Image: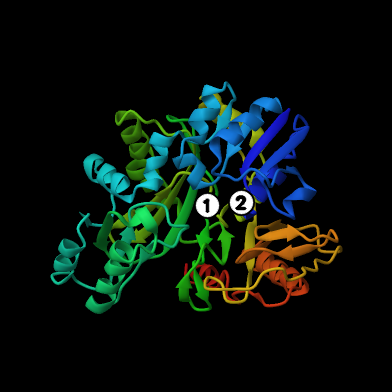
């Protein structure tokens, strides 16, 4: 089979490596891919992930048998719809279903209409009205840009001054462009956060192993929000009772709500959850695999990924037994110094050839230099993932490997998994 994966980051690399395990996978194309992905797929850097018509033309001309659209932007732009129109089977939601991520307003209104537990909220399209509302609000509070913002469109002001600055930044200064035409202001929830990715064909749903993300740039969850500095799986805060409650009150009702709205969701649905004192609540939905959650979840998948994705496409997921391996996985992100602010690129990357078999290095922000070596090209450069019988073992292996990889300005958090280990000790 000829396969195509749209995207060029660590998430896509994890998907490609898992697809390669299927013996039917002959050639995998990555559009655009990156320097490290080139070792596992044929990269086409001349076609960007948002160039929908070029992607469809490529799929047609290269006899693609199955496509995976991984990032949020092409999903929101209707890449899956166009591929289907061209007769190409693919994994991912259509544009109408992708609104569950591309519009925070749509998602919040959906939850309110169908009684899915989430934070109380108000929607504003007028900055003056938003600023007036803030004067009556309690703090901290959450301010979200309506549209896609590379995972950085959520701000948590601690007081009125910070909240007013957040509104002005999003709505008046256009920090996130048109994504800030409307904003959601919602109550601040407390409790441990849990990420649950799930395969779904619109009716059947198969939750993946839960995970814990680390969004802040600095140790101790300090600093600016990032796309993710590391993850661990499973998340010890996600107990069997919480999982059962989420299935009953969140997962199945969300799928039913999307069907009722005429946009059934097929693909990977990401549930960003908070286990509050009043029970699990939805913080956010994503319409695709999370990054870097994918880098710890897929290594624990025993069932062949291509088979699962084909079952989603054919709407036969309910007939498939999806299995997971025991143990745990940990991912430590190696970033360029200065990320998520300004940073330099073009720094040569050195990766030892003798890393343990339990370690996989996922390439996120690198490119091939003229001499064929790898050099940094983004903020988050590599995701160093290790699997182990225990979370402690996975973390020790991941950090040992991360310490041996070199590039100028390399930065990583030193406390990935610390909260998870503490939660396990407190159980």
Residue at 38% x, 64% y: name it: 175
Q: Residues within 10 Å of mark 2 (few under 14, many from 20)?
A: many
Q: What element carries label 2?
A: helix
Identify the mark at residue 256; answer none if there is no mark. none
Asked if marks 2 and 1 touch (Cβ < 8 Å), the reply is yes
Residue at 55% x, 55% y: name it: 291
Q: What element carries label 1?
A: loop
Which residue is labeled 1 in the image?
290
Q: Quadrant of residue 149?
A: bottom left
Precedes in sequence: disc 2 or disc 1: 2
Horizontal side of 294 relative to 223 (left or right) equals right
Residue 377 in sight from this viewpoint:
yes
Query: x and y percent of residue 156 in the render?
Result: 33, 70
Q: How crowded is mark 1: few (under 14 residues within 10 Å), some or many (20 or more)?
A: many
Query: x and y percent of residue 86 in the render?
Result: 56, 23
Residue 238 in sight from this viewpoint:
no
- Colouring scheme, one of rainbow, by chain, secondary structure, one colour: rainbow
Q: Nearer the viewer, residue 353 or 340?
A: 340
Labels in figure, total: 2
Query: x and y percent of residue 89 in the render?
Result: 58, 26
Q: Please state, as top left, top right, bottom left or bottom right, where the N terminus lies in the image.
A: top right
Determine whether 71 is above or below 229 in the image. above
Query: x and y percent of residue 46 in the render?
Result: 67, 45
Horizontal side of 274 relative to 136 (left or right) equals right
Horizontal side of 422 relative to 396 (left or right) equals left
Which residue is labeled 2 in the image?
11
Q: Nearer the viewer, residue 326 or 20?
A: 20
Q: Which of 139 and 198 is in front in this view?
A: 139
Residue at 37% x, 63% y: name it: 154
Alpha carbon separation for disc pair 2 and 1 = 7 Å
Q: In which quarter of the image is residue 69?
A: top right
């Amino acid at each position: 089979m000829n396969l195509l994966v749209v995207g060029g980051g660590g998430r896509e690399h994890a998907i490609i490596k898992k697809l390669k395990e299927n013996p039917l996978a002959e050639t995998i194309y990555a559009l655009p891919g990156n320097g490290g992905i080139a070792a596992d797929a044929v990269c086409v850097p001349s076609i960007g992930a948002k160039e929908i018509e070029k992607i469809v033309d490529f799929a047609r001309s290269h006899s693609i048998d199955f496509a995976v659209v991984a990032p949020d932007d092409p999903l929101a732009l209707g890449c899956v719809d166009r591929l289907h129109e061209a007769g190409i089977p693919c994994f991912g939601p259509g544009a109408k279903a992708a609104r569950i991520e591309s519009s925070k307003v749509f998602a919040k209104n959906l939850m309110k209409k169908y009684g899915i537990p989430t934070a109380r909220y108000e929607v504003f399209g007028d900055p003056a009205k938003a600023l007036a509302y803030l004067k009556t609000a309690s703090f901290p509070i959450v301010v979200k840009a309506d549209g896609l913002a590379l995972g950085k469109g959520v701000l948590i002001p601690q007081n009125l001054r910070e909240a007013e600055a957040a509104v002005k930044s999003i709505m008046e200064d256009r920090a996130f462009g048109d994504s800030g035409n409307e904003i959601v202001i919602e109550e601040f929830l407390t409790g441990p956060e849990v990420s649950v990715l799930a395969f779904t064909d619109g009716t059947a749903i198969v939750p993946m192993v839960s995970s814990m993300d680390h969004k802040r740039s600095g140790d101790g969850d300090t600093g600016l929000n990032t796309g993710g500095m590391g993850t661990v799986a499973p998340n010890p805060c996600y107990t069997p009772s919480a999982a059962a409650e989420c299935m009953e009150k969140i997962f199945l009702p969300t799928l039913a709500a999307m069907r009722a709205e005429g946009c059934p969701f097929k693909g990977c649905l990401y549930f960003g959850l908070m286990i509050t004192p009043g029970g699990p609540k939805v913080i956010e939905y994503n319409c695709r695999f999370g990054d870097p959650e994918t880098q710890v979840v897929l290594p624990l998948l025993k069932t062949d990924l291509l088979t699962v994705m084909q079952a989603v496409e054919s709407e036969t997921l309910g007939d498939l037994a999806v299995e997971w391996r025991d143990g745990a996985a940990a991912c430590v992100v190696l970033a360029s110094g200065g990320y998520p602010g300004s940073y330099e690129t073009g720094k040569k990357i050195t990766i030892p050839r003798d890393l343990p078999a339990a370690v996989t290095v996922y390439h996120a922000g690198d490119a091939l230099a003229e001499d064929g070596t790898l050099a940094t090209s983004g903020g988050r450069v590599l995701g160093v993932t290790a699997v182990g019988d225990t979370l402690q073992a996975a973390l020790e292996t991941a950090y040992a490997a991360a310490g041996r990889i070199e590039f100028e300005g390399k930065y990583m958090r030193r406390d990935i998994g610390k909260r998870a280990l503490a939660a396990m000790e407190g159980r």
